């Protein structure tokens, strides 16, 4: 029953804004440590678990290797997240370079294979103070373990209270000791449970890998179209060129020209790059297996960069007319200007890119979560693989729903790429608009 | 419980920020330089080419129409000329025939006239000849008679002489 509840919570969440979700997280009860003898792996993990529980008097939290009850929400959140290693199938990973920096310790260059990840992307050992938990790099806080490799028997997570705030802490069990772990630095100021920690992760992650791949594929496609466009000059276009050119003309004629005006040519390459970059990432994210499925455009770091570029371009190309109308609107009483209009307009300058980044991020993440939730139906009905009949019933419900969502997401992939480009063009257009003479 | 801590997609990460910026800037540069520029140029060129071709086709069509009208005019002119020529030829023919007829008539008349003249001349000549012959005969006869008579009768001779003078030959 709890699985059902969590499933619906995940659904409701995906429909709502990301902030609404934060409250859900607060109201969530800690997962019950339900013992599932059939689900627990009978091999080393079970012994690892007994090690954990046997470990002294103080609590080290819940073991990650233990197969608890299937949780659709956790599953979705795990799958939309970035990761340091790409999980392909079973225990097969595509190992990626790790570029880590810890102030006071320096740079650490390695690959995820150094952690020997097994089940669930948990590494078997630490390296230079770093460990791999659920496919993500974390860092040990114990300074005695900063050099060399240490065997990690298990990972746990527990809820702790720090400065009156509830936090989730991950631990690594090394030599039977509970070693607290630090997550990588994030710039959320602690609002979303992150913050500046003991290390920075500049690794080529799953998202970085997908971005590189997408950029490369797009470049090769467009390069070939451009070559054939130059080669077949004076002849009718054909093949790939025929497929890509209408997209380019669409952005040029429907987005750039009407919104930017006669100076559109200067901004067209940016709009086209943004459109195809977002579209390519949206589409590759829809592919449910390697090399797809990465939720790149649903990661706020990516949308921040794109929105910031639009912000920089539009702000730096803004003309006198724009600044005058933003900061000191002519024809309005000074009192109104100082207290209402100017503050609102100035706020608007920053809100525009903010909505831009949030819209893309929320739409793509929500789409991924809904699809993952529908796929989770199979595991919920099948009680995580225990009940074959249940799995079949889940699949019967899941397949049409997932198919529907994937079709919808295909539309969303184009729509969001288009909206981002369109609004970028609108912002640039407003910034460089020439004054109208009334 | 795991939710918020693991909901990492909403937390801006330095690594991903860095890589996205780097990848997108390189992508932007490469795409602008090696893909969008040639594509945009070829699109523009093709558009002007198509417009030119359309304009030219329109021009050619107008020219064609012009030419056709001219042709028609020429044809009409030619037709008119032909009928003119035909008419002229017919006139000339009629004229020639009439002239020939006239000439033939004149010739005929002249021939007949000259024949008549000849006949007249011949007749006159014959007459003269005859007169001469008859005269000679008469003279011979008279001579003979006269030889016989005159030898003795001068009155006879005078009478014969008057007779010959009064003879009218037709």
Image (tube, grey):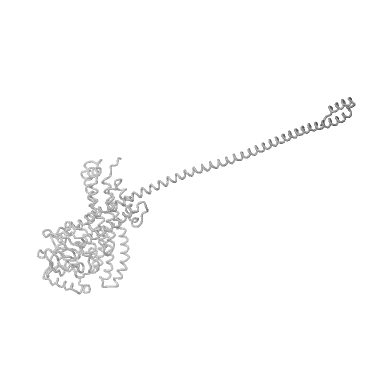
List x then y, in percent, for residue A45: 18, 72
- Tell me which corner region of the image, top left, top right, bottom left or bottom right, holds residue A366: bottom left
List x then y, in percent, for residue B117: 73, 33
Name above or below for residue A19 compared with residue A172.
above
Q: Nearer the viewer, residue B73 or A189?
A: B73
Q: Is residue B60 left or right of residue A66?
A: right
Q: Quadrant of the C terminus of chain A?
A: top left
Q: Nearer the viewer, residue A24 or A205?
A: A205
Residue at 78% x, 32% y is B129
Residue at 37% x, 53% y is A236
In this orientation, does residue A68 appear? yes
Q: Quadrant of the N terminus of chain A?
A: bottom left
- Tell me which corner region of the image, top left, top right, bottom left or bottom right, holds residue A171: bottom left
Residue reaching furthest right?
A: B152
Q: Nearer the viewer, residue A235 or A190?
A: A235
In this orientation, does residue A281 appear? no
Q: State the count of labels.
A: 0
- Tell me which corner region of the image, top left, top right, bottom left or bottom right, holds residue B143: top right
Name above or below for residue A433 compared with residue B35.
above
Q: Is residue B100 left or right of residue A361?
A: right
List x then y, in percent, for residue A379: 26, 69
Q: Is residue A124 left or right of residue A253?
A: left
Q: Nearer the viewer, residue A278 or B158?
A: B158
List x then y, in percent, for residue A357: 24, 54
């Amino acid at each position: 029953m709890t699985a059902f509840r969590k499933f619906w919570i995940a659904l409701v969440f995906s429909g709502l804004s990301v902030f609404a979700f934060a409250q859900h997280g607060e109201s969530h009860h800690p997962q019950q440590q339900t013992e599932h003898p059939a689900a627990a792996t009978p091999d080393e993990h079970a012994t690892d678990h007994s090690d954990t529980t046997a470990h002294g008097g103080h609590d080290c939290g819940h073991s990650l290797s233990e197969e608890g009850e299937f949780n659709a929400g956790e599953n979705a959140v795990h799958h939309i997240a970035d990761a340091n290693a790409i999980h392909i199938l079973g225990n097969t990973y595509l190992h990626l370079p790790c570029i880590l920096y810890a102030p006071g310790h320096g740079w650490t260059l390695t690959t995820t294979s150094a952690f020997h990840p097994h089940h669930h992307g948990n590494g078997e050992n630490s390296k230079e103070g770093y460990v791999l938990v659920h496919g993500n790099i974390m860092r040990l806080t114990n300074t005695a373990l900063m050099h060399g490799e240490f065997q990690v028997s298990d990972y746990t997570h527990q809820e702790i209270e720090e400065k009156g705030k509830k936090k989730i802490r991950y631990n690594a069990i090394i030599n039977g000791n509970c070693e607290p772990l630090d997550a990588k630095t994030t710039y959320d100021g602690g609002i979303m449970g992150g913050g500046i920690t003991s290390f920075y992760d500049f690794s080529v992650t799953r998202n970085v890998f997908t971005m590189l791949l997408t950029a490369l594929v797009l470049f090769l496609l467009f390069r070939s179209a451009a070559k054939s466009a130059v080669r077949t000059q004076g002849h009718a276009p054909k093949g790939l060129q025929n497929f890509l050119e209408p997209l380019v003309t669409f952005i040029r004629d429907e987005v750039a020209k009407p919104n930017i005006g006669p100076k559109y040519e200067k901004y067209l390459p940016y709009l086209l790059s943004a459109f195809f970059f977002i579209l390519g990432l949206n589409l590759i994210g829809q592919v449910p297996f390697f090399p797809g499925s990465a939720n790149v455009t649903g990661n706020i770091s990516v949308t921040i960069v794109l929105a910031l570029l639009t912000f920089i371009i539009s702000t730096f190309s803004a003309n006198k007319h724009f600044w005058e109308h933003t900061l000191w609107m002519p024809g309005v009483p000074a009192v109104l200007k100082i207290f209402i209009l100017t503050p609102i307009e100035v706020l608007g300058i920053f809100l525009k890119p903010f909505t831009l980044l949030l819209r893309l991020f929320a739409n793509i993440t929500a789409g991924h979560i809904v699809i993952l939730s529908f796929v989770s139906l199979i595991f919920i009905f099948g009680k995580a693989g225990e009940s074959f009949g249940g799995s079949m019933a889940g699949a019967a419900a899941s397949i049409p729903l997932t198919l529907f969502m994937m079709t919808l997401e295909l539309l969303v992939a184009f729509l969001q790429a288009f909206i981002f480009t369109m609004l970028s063009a609108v912002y640039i257009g407003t910034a460089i608009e020439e004054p109208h003479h009334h | 419980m795991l939710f918020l801590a693991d909901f990492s997609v909403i937390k801006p990460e330095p690594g991903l920020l860095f890589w996205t910026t780097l990848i997108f800037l390189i992508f932007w540069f490469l795409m602008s330089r090696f893909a969008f520029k040639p594509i945009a140029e070829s699109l523009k060129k093709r558009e002007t080419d198509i417009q030119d071709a359309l304009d030219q086709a329109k021009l050619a069509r107008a020219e064609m129409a012009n030419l056709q009208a001219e042709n028609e005019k020429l044809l009409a002119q030619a037709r008119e000329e032909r009928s003119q020529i035909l008419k002229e030829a017919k006139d000339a023919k009629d004229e020639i025939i009439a002239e020939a007829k006239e000439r033939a008539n004149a010739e005929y008349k002249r021939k007949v006239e000259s024949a008549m003249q000849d006949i007249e001349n011949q007749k006159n000549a014959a007459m003269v000849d005859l007169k001469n012959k008859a005269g000679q005969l008469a003279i011979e006869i008279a001579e003979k008679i006269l030889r016989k008579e005159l030898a003795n009768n001068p009155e006879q001779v005078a009478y014969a002489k008057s007779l010959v003078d009064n003879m009218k030959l037709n």
